[in-house]
Amino acid sequence: MGEPVGGWSRLQGVWKVLTGLVLVVLVVWRPSVASFGGAACGTWVVLALLQLGLLLGAAVFRVRVPLVVIGIGRELRTWNRPHLRVVWRSVPLLLSVGLSSIKAPVRRRLWLTGLTSVVLSTAAVVVAWLGALVWSDADQPFLRGFAIAGTAVLVNGLWPRRGAGTTSPGWFVFALPRVSGRTAAEFEATPLVNEVSDALEVGDLDRAEAIADELVERHPTLLVAIGARVAVLTLRAKYGEALHTVSGLVARTDLGPRDMAFVLAEMASSTANAIEGGQLPADIGLPAAKRAADGAMQFGYPRYRCNGTLAQLALLENDHATALTLATQAKKSSEGRLSRADALATIARAQMAAGDNAAARATLVEAEELAGWMPRVAETSARLNIS
């Protein structure tokens, strides 16, 4: 999917510290309704500008934006276009985007995109400070609150951090130019990885497999290359082979916490698929899959991204209600066509297991429109038609 950037639920613990700092400064420095109103406005505006700057930079420097999430809360509508998924949520106050470069030089394009975001947001904060302290003789509590809160949000965005759930604009600007070795190679391989993803999205498995094989031949140790091969194996329903490939990564000593989070999450997913596909005994696979999912989350993998796998595991344990709840959450937070179709397949299976075949048929309508060729979707449809 690329580097996820932004989103209210993804802000790190440093955000709490900065929020407290803003409140302290406002209280000490002549608090008023206007200053707190300005702080609320400054928070929202600078958060928005950080993301809008990424969108602007991506358009100018030709970086792909595969995901745009507008708002927080309940999903109201989604738009699926080639290489782009747009989600509109019930409270449209915040914006979250994902970035994925498709043209070399990859790191330079991402750096310039991050720089655009930082420059645009910094300009807004500087203007607010000038308006509050320089351009007016009268006290400007609204602008003062705006400037203080905007500065806190900007500092949070500038702080270089990259985890399994988010990458800050500051990481692109200050840390990305200095990466080397395998991390740098992962970025440079992104265009080929995107070609695999594009082929998989339209069900062209032969093309996807050819590109994935080329990737692994060129870069046998890169996680993105191995991940591309695992994705192809999964969509060919070769779940046991996919699990064997992922399991070989766990013993590597060159993987940091972020890398290990992704490896364990994929291991949990592959294990669940192998059990469901009859390629691994449940008494062996279920405990292993749960341990892998827990380990991924301990290394920082967002829980909402594990919901699809956890739903599968609940279904394998005949906990239909939990499976339905988790799969519904996975559908709402899905970041692509295939992940949404997969979640819908799990929902349909949970509904079938609960005896509601009519609801399962209604659920599968969207899944088949998105990716009716996917093994889990096709198998679910076949089972429903037989029943």
Image (tube, rainbow, N blue to C red):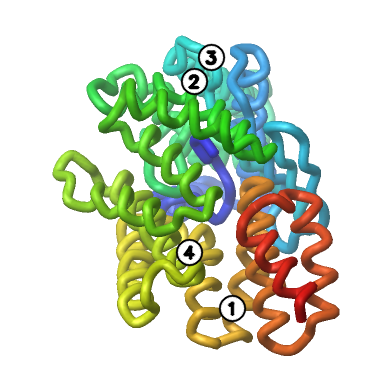
Give the residue pinned by disc 2. Answer: 110
Q: Nearer the viewer, mark 2 or mark 4?
A: 4
Q: Which mark is residue 27?
A: none
Give the residue pinned by disc 3. Answer: 103
Which one is earlier in the sequence, the residue at label 2 or at label 4?
2
Q: Nearer the viewer, mark 2 or mark 3?
A: 3
Could you tell me which residue is drawn at 70 percent across and 61 percent down?
A: 73
Type of amino acid under label 3: Lys
Give the answer, above or below, for where 141 lies relative to 53: below
Q: What is the secondary structure assignment of the residue under circle 3?
A: loop
- CA neighbours of label 2 inside 10 A, class few (<14), some (14 to 19), many (20+): many
Which one is earlier in the sequence, the residue at label 3 or at label 4?
3
Q: Is residue 179 visible?
A: yes
Which one is earlier in the sequence, the residue at label 4 or at label 1?
4
Give the residue pinned by disc 4. Answer: 273
Type of amino acid under label 4: Asn
Choose top left, top right, bottom left or bottom right for residue 180. top left
Outermost residue toward the left in this view: 253
Q: CA distance from mark 3 to mark 1?
A: 40 Å
Give the residue pinned by disc 1. Answer: 323
Choose top left, top right, bottom left or bottom right for residue 61. top right
Type of amino acid under label 2: Leu
Residue 135 percent coordinates (x, y)? 66, 19
- Check contact, mark 2 vs mark 4: CB within 8 A: no
